Structure formats: structure tokens, C-alpha cells
Image (spheres, rainbow, N blue to C red):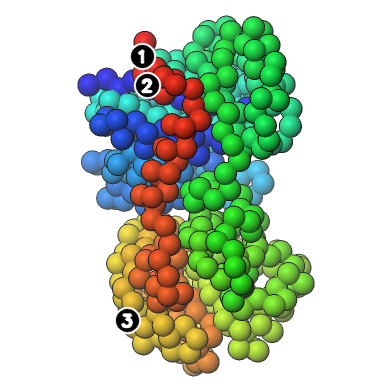
Amino acid sequence: MTARCVMVLGTSSGAGKSWLATALCRWYARQGLKVAPFKAQNMSNNARVVATLPGSAGPLGEIGSAQYFQALAARAEPDVRMNPVLLKPEHDTHSQVVLLGQVSATLTAMPWRERSDHVWPRVAQALDALRAENDVVVIEGAGSPAEINLRDSDFVNMRVAHHAGAACLLVTDIDRGGAFAHLYGTWGLLAPADRALLRGFVFNKFRGDATLLAPGPQQLERLTGVPLVATLPMWRTHGLPQEDGVFDEGGGPGGEVRLTVAVVACPRISNLDEFQPMKNVPGLRLRWVRSPAELAGADWVVLPGSKHTSGDLAWLRARGLDRAIALHAQRGGQVLGICGGLQMLGEALVDPHAIDGNCPGLGLLPLVTQFAPDKTVRRSEVAFGAVTGPWAPLAGVRMRGYEIRHGQTAQHPAMAHAAEVMPGGLAWQNPAGNVLGVYLHGLFEDPAVLQALFGVRVPTLESVFDGLADFIEEHFDTGVLPGLLQG
């Protein structure tokens, strides 16, 4: 078996590559084909725990969330080959490098442009293995394939495309404006051999009357030889979590707002995609906040995961958010910390190995976190214990989640203990019951948790994936999707 490869390239980040690749994974899977996703290198602090390869340092590793969801859409078991290189930004000029699911200190310390030659053999091997096991591999590019300053070291886009002999689509966000120029400019900067792989242009996030695009598509095809094969309307409520960036507040179920949840949008926020299901809860307004004023009127304050906890704590303090969160808790408002957010709620961060940084915490839970050199990466299924106060509906609820962390957290030895409300040191609660810290990611993706907290069920991922496939089937030109698998 040698899979045919379909690749989604973009004129920029945020053009819609991940979204379209996910839809293609489900569409081809519904044709009875065995499908797998692939992205050579992803840069994201949104990661999921998946199976590793035989002989790896551990049985589980990390890949970008986008490839995790694409694997589920393809009805495939996610594994580290689907995203062999994951960059997790810790500062503006520094990222942790994860190779085939495991942190690589050597690659992390290596200059950016020198990594390509070191990782390409592993990337090509992973892609070849997936091709040998599947009928179709849906490949996602990164950023733009026409970044001429990076061309010599870019192994994510056209090097992968040529290695796989991929049929390539080039997608652009028409809502930003300048879409014809983005497509033509990208095509113009590509080498002739690269242009030969382009099978179609795609407009994404179109609003308005599509007939008004004429004669632009026809002129563009005369200039490039590449047809416009789809104009995808703006669709805010598709339900697929954003790969990166804080998603907006629009697109929820509407109706009267009965609960306002404020998620603090720290610079190094991680795993924010786990909040997507909350957008579908009737009566719940999800608000992303960066200042004390934006916390006003919130019922819950949520401190999400962080790739650099001490840095995000410094950011909180610089904006006065530490005081605002403390006041919210003193008034009895609910506060939830998840993973890095749990660490922030404690008394102190201790970093003897220079992993994250030493820092005082917010002091809302009597806990101390010490950062360890080895990262905890695992899936967990565990029940809440005797949760009290406003979080009491979680008592006894069994949930599935995952952990990705360097921090190891314990009770402060000189302070009255917090209530440990989940075995294994995975969750703690303050005596008043309104402050809860949980190490497990995936809280709001678990149906039992959603039912307990909100009394609702939200659309499943399966229905989301099928909706995406239906959408592209409706809006792509007839015959294009099966035609991409032809030589």
C-alpha cells in the first residue's frame, strides 16, 4: 500500500489549512479509504497525548492538537508520526522541540536553521511509514510555502510535497482582503517545479455574493494555470477547536446569559482548545480577558494551562490581574486553575533545574510546585472525590483527561492543607470550596463533566467532523475531491 497524498498549503498562517485538512480527512474516510493526517512540523502550545513508536523513551508522547483532531476525523488512532516535530514556544525567540513525541534537549538548543538537516530523515521516515499503511495521507503545510527567506531550511511545505508527490491545494482567507494578490503572489514566488504540484486554489471565509468574484477567478487561472476549485463561505459555528490563537466570543448558541466564564488569556497559554465545548453550552458566555476591567461581572475565573508558568505569572502581576483574581476569590467567586493555572494558584514555584523559573504564586491554594527535568506525559481516567462548595456537582464524577507538565505539586509543609479532591495529587480545593485546581486537561471535553456542571450535552466531535465533510462536499467543484487522488 502506497498512499496517495493530498496537501493543504496556505498563503499565510490562519488561512484555514488545519480546518480544511480535518474536513478532507473525514471526507476521504467516508469514501471507505484508510486515511491518516501528517504535518512535518507544527508550532503550537496546544498538544495532545498519543501513542509513540516501539523503542521510544515512553509509551506516550505529544503531537499538535490539530493533527490529533485530524486523526480522529480520519478514524485513525493518533500517533507521533502524524506530527514528527512539534515546537512549543516558551518565549518570543525560544521554543521547546519535541521530536516524535519526546522532548529533545539537543534540538531545542540548536539554532533554527540548523535543525532541518537533522530532523528531515526522521520526518521522511514517518511520512513514508504512514504512506505504507494507508490509502490516503492528508498533509498540512505550515505558514506559507513562499517564505523565500526560509526556503533553504523549510522542510514542512514543498520539500514534503515533492517527497510525497502530493496533489496540493492553496487556501487563502478572503475575509482579510487581498485574496487574489495572496494567491498570485504565493504562486509567483514558488519555483516552477513547485507550481506544477498545485491542483487548485481555495477561497476560505467568504461573505457575500459569490457571483461578484467574476471575472477574478478566470483571470487568475489565465495567469497561473491553476483553477479556483472552491469558495467556502464564512462558518463560525463549525465546532472544530481553533489550532492556535484565542477564538472570539461569537458563534455560541445564543439566548439569555446565565453564566459568564472569564478565561485569562496569558501570552503562553496552552491547550486552549479544550474550552471549545463551552461555546456550545446554552446560557454560557465565554470571555477571554487580559485586564482587571474585563473580569468585571464574571462568575468564574479560569487560569488555563501555560507553557511558561512563571512568565505568565509575571504578566498577570504587571497588569494587576493577580489582585483582581484574589478579590474575586475573596468575594466567593469561583476560580479554576488547570495544569499551569493550578501551579499559579499555589504559594510558590521552585525551579532547581532551570526549567521554568522561580516565582511566588497567587497564594489561593497552599501548594508548592517544583519543576522536574522529565516531563509527565500521560492519559488518565479518574473520579473526583468529595468536592464541596460551588464545585460540588463534580463530586464522584469520573472523567478522562491527559497530562503534559514538568511541574510536580505538593501541599505546603508549613500551611494548613488543602483538600485533595482527586487521587494522585491531581486536584485540590481551598477550605471555602470556591477555588479548585486540576492537573488534568480535557475537563470540558468530558460529557460527564459537562452534564454535572451545566446539565447539558454538546455536539460530539463525530458530528463536527461529519459536518465539515458535508460542507466541503457542498462547496468544492464536482469531481475535485476524488480527482485529487488521481495521478
Mark 2 Cα-neighbour bin, 10 Å: few <14, some 14–19, many ≥20: few
Q: Which residue is mark 1?
A: 486
Distance from the alpha carbon under mark 2 to that under mark 3: 48 Å
**Residue shown at 52% from the left, 68% from the top:** 282
| Cβ–Cβ under 8 Å for marks 2 and 1 | yes
Distance from the alpha carbon under mark 2 to that under mark 1: 7 Å
Instruction: Report x, y in % for residue 176.
Output: 71, 36
Mark 1 and mark 3 lie on one chain; the one further toward the N terminus is 3
Nearer to us of marks 1 and 3 is 1
Does residue 156 show up? no
The quarter in which the N terminus is drawn is top left
Q: Nearer the viewer, residue 191 or 118?
A: 191
Disc 3 marks which amino acid? Gly
Q: Name which quarter of the figure residue 375 lies in.
A: bottom left
Label at residue 396: 3
Q: Name which quarter of the figure residue 214 lies in.
A: top right
Q: Which residue is mark 2?
A: 482
Instruction: Report x, y in % for residue 272.
Output: 54, 57
**Residue shown at 38% from the left, 50% from the top:** 463
Does residue 332 show up? yes
Instruction: Report x, y in % for residue 229.
Output: 53, 21
Disc 2 marks which amino acid? Pro
Q: Which element carries disc 3, helix, strand or loop?
A: loop
Q: Nearer the viewer, residue 47 or 307?
A: 47
Disc 1 marks which amino acid? Gln
